[in-house]
Amino acid sequence: MTESDTTERPQGWYVDDRCMNCNVARQYAPDLIGYTEGGQYGGLSKVMRQPRNEDEVRQMYNAAYACPTRSVHPPENDWATEFDPYPMPLDSDGVVFLCGHTSPRTYGATSYLLRRPDGTAIMVDTPRWRPALARRYQDAVGAITDVLLTHLDHVAHGRQYADAFGAQLWIHEGDLHSRPDADQVIRGIDRVEIKPGVIAYPFPGHTEGTTLFVADEKFCFTGDALFWSNSLSDLDLPDSVVYDSIKTWAQSVKRGAEELTFEWVLPGHGSFKHLPAPEMKRRMHALADRALDFPEQEVDYGKVRY
C-alpha cells in the first residue's frame, strides 16, 4: 500500500505540515517524535531522530498507522502493511486493545476495544470508518455488542460501526443532539451499568453529556474529561477547551475522586497511564483541588499541553 503526497519528501521518516497536533504520534513513539511550535493547531509533531533498531521502526509504524492525517511518513513512503499493529493489546492480559487509525473527524481521538469474560467486546469511541477495519476488529476480539460514545466530539463514526457490528450505540442525553440516532441514552448523573462490570459515569463539564466508562474498577475510558499529561507527569484536564462549564467540570472531578476506582486512565487525547488504584485516587483528589481554581476562558486548543 502506498500513500502519496505531492510535497518534496525528506530522507527517512518525517512528519508533514498537515499535522493536527493531536499528540497521537508523540504517544506511540515518544523518544522519536516530539513537539515543536508552529502550524494552525498551536503546535506540530516532528521527527526528532531516526529509528535505530527494529523496535524503534515498529514504534514509528505504530505512530504512522494511528495518525489521523497520515502525516507520519516512512522512508520512501513505504507503508508496509505487515507493520500495521492494530488492534494492538495495551495491557498484559489482553483485555484492552488500541484501535489505532484515528479519524480527523474526531481530531485524532484514540478509541479502544474492551474484551469481556463472556467472549464479547465493546468499542469505546471510534476510529476512522473503513468496512475492512470493522471486520478486522471483530476478527481480533469477537462479537462487538456495544459502541460507547464519551461525548459529542467523538461521535462521527459511531452509527457506522454500530451498524457494521450489529451493536447498540450509547450516548448521554446531554450530547444526544450530536447523535440522535443512538440506541441507548444515558440520563442524569447517576451511574448506569452497560454490561456486568462496565459502568457509565456521567461527567459533565467538557460537554454537557461527557461520560466516563469504567470497566472492572481497573480501566477508565475518559474521552476528553481527563488524561495523563506527560508535561506535568500527572492527571490533568484540557481546561482551555470547555463547551459546558469549567465549574461543573470541577464538580465532576470532585465527585469522581470520591466515587471512582481505576488503575488505567485511557483518554481520547493525551497519554494513557497505569498506576495502582490508590495512587490514581490520590491524584484524582489533587486534580479536584486544582480544578477549583481553573478560570472560565475562551476555547483555545493550542493551550493544551499533553
Image (tube, rainbow, N blue to C red):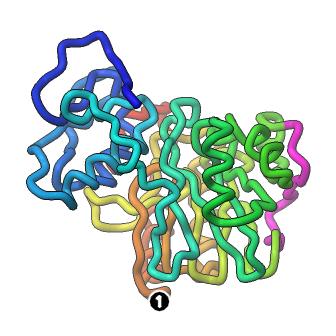
Residue at the extreme top? 6
Q: Is 145 or 239 nearer to us in this picture?
A: 145
Report if residue 80 lies within the magenta region.
no
Q: In the figure, 88 relative to 108: above or below?
A: below
Q: In the figure, 254 relative to 268: above or below?
A: below
The image shows residue 189 at horizontal and vertical percentages of 80, 63
Q: Is residue 292 left or right of residue 197?
A: left
Dot 1 falls on a residue whose secondary structure is helix
Q: In the figure, 208 relative to 189: above or below?
A: above
Whether residue 251 is visible, yes or no, is no
The image shows residue 67 at horizontal and vertical percentages of 40, 39
Q: Is 184 or 142 nearer to us in this picture?
A: 142
* Extent of the magenta region: 180-193
Residue shown at 89%/54% (left/top)?
Answer: 184
Q: Is residue 191 left or right of residue 64?
A: right
Q: Is 71 or 20 nearer to us in this picture?
A: 71
Q: Is residue 33 left or right of residue 129?
A: left
Q: Is residue 60 left or right of residue 158?
A: left
Residue hosting label 1: 278
The image shows residue 57 at horizontal and vertical percentages of 21, 51
Disc 1 packing (10 Å; few <14; some 14–19; many ≥20):
few
Residue shown at 49%/32% (left/top)?
Answer: 299
> Residue 3's image quarter?
top left
Secondary structure of the magenta portion, mostly?
A: loop
Q: Amino acid at mark 1?
A: Pro
Residue shown at 13%/23% (left/top)?
Answer: 10
Q: Is 80 or 303 nearer to us in this picture?
A: 80
Residue shown at 46%/75% (left/top)?
Answer: 91
